[in-house]
Image (cartoon, rainbow, N blue to C red):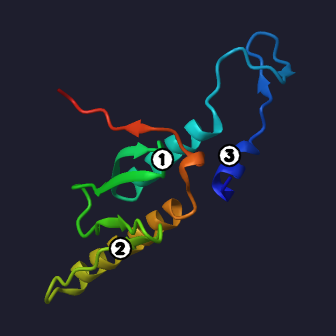
Amino acid sequence: MTGYAAQRMAVCTYRKHTTSGKDTAMNPQPQMSIEEDTTQHLVKDANRLGYTIVTIDTTDDLAIEIRPAARLPYTPPLYRDWQTGQWTIQTTSYGSLDPEEIEKVTDGYRRAIAMVSELAPLNARDLVNYSITRNA
């Protein structure tokens, strides 16, 4: 279990009972598994960083399809090397840019580094299968 998943497991399970106001260890409502919670947080974090997680397949080895979201410019694509399991960031030359655009480029790379930092420690046991819902 990775550090992130272990942190999620450490969350207190005591809930405030809505009618009695007492703390109880039993929550009558179904709770997400640690893997479901980790998956949900990964999808939210990806969105915050300018990426869309299209699919997560945990069948054999961990396969994650992740794409830059169109809403944030200069968000570089991410790739996973299947031999090493290492995530890489696609670099691009944008030619001559003014300082404000350079700031956007560096912001995109900072977000990419943050996203890779979230993805790198994960394995198939930490997540559940996921597929983005598309409007028909």
Residue positioned 71% across, 51% down in the render: 7
Residue positioned 58% across, 62% down in the render: 121
16 relative to 61, above or below: above
Quadrant the C terminus occupies: top left
114 relative to 128, above or below: below
Label count reads 3
125 relative to 110, above or below: above
| Apparent side of residue 20 relative to residue 70 in the rendered image (left or right) | right
* Dot 1 amino acid type: Asp
Q: Earlier in the sequence, mark 1 or mark 2?
A: 1
Residue positioned 46% across, 38% down in the render: 129
Residue underneath mark 1 = 60
- Alpha-carbon neighbours of circle 3 within 10 Å: few (<14), some, or many (≥20)? some
Q: Earlier in the sequence, mark 3 or mark 1?
A: 3
Residue 98 picture quarter: bottom left
Residue 26 at x, y percent in the picture: 80, 20
| Apparent side of residue 33 relative to residue 69 in the rendered image (left or right) | right
- Alpha-carbon neighbours of circle 1 within 10 Å: few (<14), some, or many (≥20)? few
Residue underneath mark 3 = 8
Q: Earlier in the sequence, mark 2 or mark 3?
A: 3
Foreground of the two, 9 or 88: 88
Residue 56 at x, y percent in the picture: 41, 45
* Dot 2 amino acid type: Ile
Secondary structure beneath label 2: strand
